[in-house]
Amino acid sequence: MKKVLSMCIVFCLLLSLAACSAGGGAPASSGPTEDADSPASVGSAPVSEITSGGALSGSFVLTEEISEPVVGNMQKNVPSGNFVSADGKFLFTAADPATGEPQLFTYDPDTKAVNPFCRDATCNHRTAACAAGGVDCNLESHGGEVYGRSNTAAGEIMRLKDGRFESTQIEGGVSHFFHYGQYLFVATLDSSLIVFEGNSKTPKTLLDEYTGYWETVCDGVLYYHSNGVCRLDLTQENAEPELLVKDAAHITDGEYIYYTGTDDLLYRCEMDGSAPEQLTDRPVLVASWNFDDDYFYFRYHTGDDMLAGDSQDLYRFPKDAPDEIEKFCTLPAPAYQIFTDADSDFLFVKTFGNDEQVGEDIYIVSKETNAAELLEF
């Protein structure tokens, strides 16, 4: 239901650039021929279809094998990323209860205390002089380092060092970024995708025209959203973008691509777009879904109203047994976004506010007891 997609995007933009996530699309992908009336074949697109993202410039080819875990949190929001662990605590962005402006916070799971990352009461947290370095979105943990996008200099990539966010000297014109191995990929404000190798400050152009997001790289292949589920083989010179699933929103754990169609039902397929299978018979809210090593988490929605029905209920299924769907938690308010951490036994869940605006209530949900506890900040 594309109206749900539009509503989610409006909610996200109202909050901040760091709180944008939603989607919709058409079920189907390339693969074995399906019956014409099969749900998994409606709107299917051939793997060879080229997206509007432009062609690979040939200036960058990935020549090394890199094995890294796929992070669901980096496939949520626009710019992507939030809730990362660092030095025994969690860093996250949320609206400041006092000002409504996006701000960087820390959560200590031992004391259950939430505090502003910058503890200076006189600071407005919007400049490079702040300990947070103006970081308000695109939080990423990679290679033992924590990164974030600053609102200064029209988008600047910052790195956490000795309790402060400092510039990586890659500044200005950064829409969003992500890492893969020693490579830093940057989507620019002028709609290009560029890549920096190691400590180099000289980028190579990957795509001259790029408006994708929700990126992840698996086995040398870049997956991203742009009018559907797209991929680009970084190991092949002069490769062209491919559209795997047309008009679909997705998230991938590196083993399967999970996606919704125009009916908002949940499907999944192989990483090449083949063997699609329907997983739910009810619409799923794209903004909510996420995964960890064992489970896929989500919530349903009813019609075009994201606050109706059982919107307060959280569901999950084992990734190796997707037919075993269970309701495991009911929140005091409609769920919005679910964030995971591979090394923790709890989830972070943001909820909608009662005034039909994106709320900043955040709950800690235990994976073991299914209990939900409100974060106080």
Image (cartoon, grey):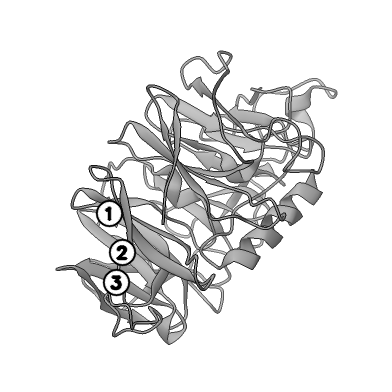
Q: Is residue 122 left or right of residue 93?
A: left
Q: Say if mark 1 contacts mark 2, CB within 8 Å.
A: yes
Badge 2 element: strand
Q: What residue type is labelled 1?
A: His
Where is residue 72? Give x, y as percent: 44, 43
Res 170 → quadrant? bottom left
Residue 217, above or below 61 = above
Q: Earlier in the sequence, mark 1 or mark 2?
A: 1
Tell me the residue that label 3 is attached to.
118
Tell me the residue that label 2 is attached to.
147
Q: Which of marks 3 and 1 is in front?
A: 3
Q: In this view, does 288 lie to the left or right of 178?
A: right
Along the line of sight, the residue nearer the viewer: 150 or 184: 150
Question: Is the residue marked by circle 1 packed among few (<14), some (14-19), or many (20+) residues within 10 Å?
Answer: some
Q: Earlier in the sequence, mark 2 or mark 3?
A: 3
Q: Which amino acid does label 2 sit on?
A: Tyr
Residue 327, above or below 137 = above
Where is residue 191? Give x, y as percent: 56, 73
Along the line of sight, the residue nearer the viewer: 170 or 137: 137
Question: Is the residue marked by circle 2 packed among few (<14), some (14-19), or many (20+) residues within 10 Å?
Answer: many
Q: Which of marks 3 and 1 is nearer the N terminus?
A: 3
